[in-house]
Amino acid sequence: MTAQTNPSRTADISTIVERLQDMLASDLTATEALLTERAKSPVDVIPDLSGYIVSAGGKRLRPMITLAAAHACGGTNPGTHALATAVEFIHTATLLHDDVVDDSDLRRGKKAAKNVWGNNASILVGDFLFARAFTLMVETGSLEILRILSDASSVIAEGEVHQLAAASRTDLPTEEYLAIIEAKTAALFEAAAEAGALSAGPGGEPHAAALAAYGKNLGLAFQIIDDALDYGGTTSVIGKAVGDDFREGKSTLPVIIARRRGSSEDQDFWDRALNPEHQTEGDLAHAIYLIRSTGAAEATLVEARAYAELAKAALRSLPESPWTKALSDLADFCVSRAH
Amino acid sequence: MTAQTNPSRTADISTIVERLQDMLASDLTATEALLTERAKSPVDVIPDLSGYIVSAGGKRLRPMITLAAAHACGGTNPGTHALATAVEFIHTATLLHDDVVDDSDLRRGKKAAKNVWGNNASILVGDFLFARAFTLMVETGSLEILRILSDASSVIAEGEVHQLAAASRTDLPTEEYLAIIEAKTAALFEAAAEAGALSAGPGGEPHAAALAAYGKNLGLAFQIIDDALDYGGTTSVIGKAVGDDFREGKSTLPVIIARRRGSSEDQDFWDRALNPEHQTEGDLAHAIYLIRSTGAAEATLVEARAYAELAKAALRSLPESPWTKALSDLADFCVSRAH
C-alpha cells in the first residue's frame, strides 16, 4: 500500500464514483426511494434498524453496477430499480448477519446495528430485508432474474459458512481463499451485473454473460482490496476497524502470502497469532510489519489488479458507450481504494 | 389441558396424520428426496446441519398442507413437490434463527443445532436454506407463488421482531398477541395452502382464497395450542422444553388470560415473573397453577378450537373429496395435541 504517486490520477480516481452517481442520478433517486419505501413496516424496529444501516453511507456500489449494466444494454426501467433495490437489500441483510457472526462493532464508520438494537433484531431484520428483496424481484416479472439472485444468495451463505469453517486455518490454500471470496462477495457482484443486463429487456441477453464475468472479477478485486485494507487502511477511510480480520483469525490473501514467504519463525507467529485466543498485544502491528516486509501487501494488490483487468476485458464484447467506460473506470476505482 | 375422556376419539385423532401421510406417500417420498438433494453443498457443515434438523422428526405439517391443498384442487406435480420442499426449507430456516434468538436448547426433542454447530453456523445455514427455497420456487414457474411466499417470509420476520419488541409486556392486548402469531406462524400455513392450490394449475385458482383462509386459521389454532402446551405438555410429547416461553418472558394467550382474570397479587406475580431477570425457582410451577386455576388453560383451548372450526368452515366452498376431509381432520388434530 504505497502512497499514490501520480496526483492527477488520484484526482481522477476519486471522482469515478461521483461521475457514475451523476450519470445515474434519476435511477439512484428512484432506488433510494424504494430502499426507504420497501423497508416500511408497522413494527418500528424494522424501518429504524434498516434505515440506520441503509443510510449509513454505503456507496451503493452493487445497485450502481445493476443500473449501469442495464444502461449498457439499452436502458433502465422500473423493473431495474426494483432489482437494484433488491440487490442492496440482499447486501444489507448479509451485512447485518455478518456483523453478528463476526461480532464486529463498527460498520461503515458507525456502531454496528447489533450494538444498537441487539443481535436478535439484526438477525430478524436481515431476514425481513432478504424476504423483501424477493418480493421486489417478483416485480421485475422475470423468473430468470429470480433464479440468478436466489442462486447467488445460497452461494453467498455457502461462502460465509466455508469462511467460518476455514477460520484460523493459516495453511489455507490460495485457491480455497479465492473460492471463499468468490462465493461470499463476488457472487453478488456477478448477479447484480448479469440480472441488471437482463432487466433491460431482450437487448440485455447477448451481453448478460459478459457482464456476469465483469461483475465476478470486479467482486474478486474488490474483496481482495478489502482484505488488504484490513492491514493497511485507516478506520476513517474504510469505515471498519483495521485488524478486524486479524482479530477474528481470518486467513486472507495478505496473510497467506506473508506466511508462505516468511521464515519458520514468522510461520510460527502466524500459526499462534491467527488463533484469536492466543493473540497478544503488539501482534497486529507485527502482522502488518510482516505483510509489508515480505512484499505480501504489494503482491495482494497485484492480484487484485489482475482481476480488475479481467473485469475490464470482459466489457470489451459490449458496444462501447459512456456506460462501458464508467463500468471500466469502476474497476480501477475498486483497486485504487488501497492506495 | 384435561385428559382426553373419549378413548375412541383419541385413537382417531392419533391416526389423522398417519392417514394423511399414507394418502401422500408418493408425494412425500418426492419431497423428502428434494429436502436432502437441495440441501447438498460442497461445504460439509451445510448438509450436516440441515440434515440434522430436517430429519429430526418434524411432522412435515406445512408441506403436507401444500400437497393436500394441491390434491384438493386437481392434483400434485413436480412443481408442487418443489414448492412443498421450499415451504419446509423456509420453516427450517426460521427454526434455526428462532433457536438462536430465543436461545433454546431443545428442538424436536434433540439438542438445538446451535448447541452442536454454534450460533453462527445456525444463522448462515438458515440463510442458505432460505435462499434455496427461492431457487426451488423458481422451478414452479409461477411468479404468483414466488410473490405469496416472499410476502409471507417478510411477514414472518415482522412477526418475530414484533414478538421480540413485545417480550415481557404482560399487558399485551389479546389482539396484539393474535397479530404476532398470525404473522410469525399462520402466514406460512396460509401461504403453504394458497400456493399449494395454485401449484395444481388453473383448477386451483378458484379455491386459492378459501385454502388461504383454511391455512391461516389452522396456523392460528396450531400456535395457540403450542403456546398452551408450553405450560402443560411434557418434554417427550412436544419435543420442546416446557416453560420455554415463560423463561423467555413471552406474553402468550394462557398468560394474558390468566393475568386478566387474576387478583392484583396474581398480576404482580406475572409482572415480576415474566421478566426473565426477576424469575425465581418455583415461578413456573406457580404460573402453571394460575393458568389452570383461573381457567385460562381451558379458555385458550376454546380459542384454538374456534380457529380450527373457521379453518374447517373455509373448506366448505371446495368440492368434497378425501382431501378436503383429510384437511378438515388435520384441524381437529392440531387442537387435539393439547389433550
Image (cartoon, coloured by chain):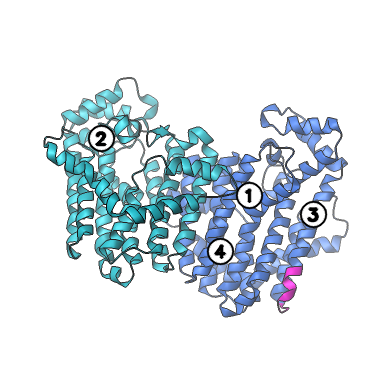
Chain colours: A cyan, B blue
User: Mark 3 is on which residue type?
Assistant: Glu
Whichever of labels 3 and 4 marks the residue nearer the N terminus, that label is 4
Give percent across and percent down for residue A29: 38, 52
Q: Secondary structure at mark 2?
A: helix
**Mark 3–mark 2 CB contact (< 8 Å):** no
User: Mark 4 is on which residue type?
Assistant: Ile
Chain letter for mark 2, please. Answer: A
For residue A247, which quarter of the picture?
top left
Residue extending furthest toward the top: A281
- Magenta stretch in the rendered image: B313-321
Residue at numbered disc 1: B108
Query: Are marks 3 and 4 in one subunit?
Result: yes
**Mark 3–mark 4 CB contact (< 8 Å):** no
Residue at numbered disc 3: B303
Q: Secondary structure at mark 4?
A: helix
How many residues crowd mark 3 within 10 Å: few (<14), some (14–19), many (20+)? some
Tell me the distance, in whole angstroms, between the alpha carbons under discs 3 and 2.
61 Å
Residue at numbered disc 2: A255
Query: Are marks 4 and 2 in one subunit?
Result: no
Chain letter for mark 4, please. Answer: B
User: Mark 1 is on which residue type?
Assistant: Arg
Tell me the distance, in whole angstroms, between the alpha carbons under discs 4 and 1.
28 Å
Give percent across and percent down for residue B108: 63, 49
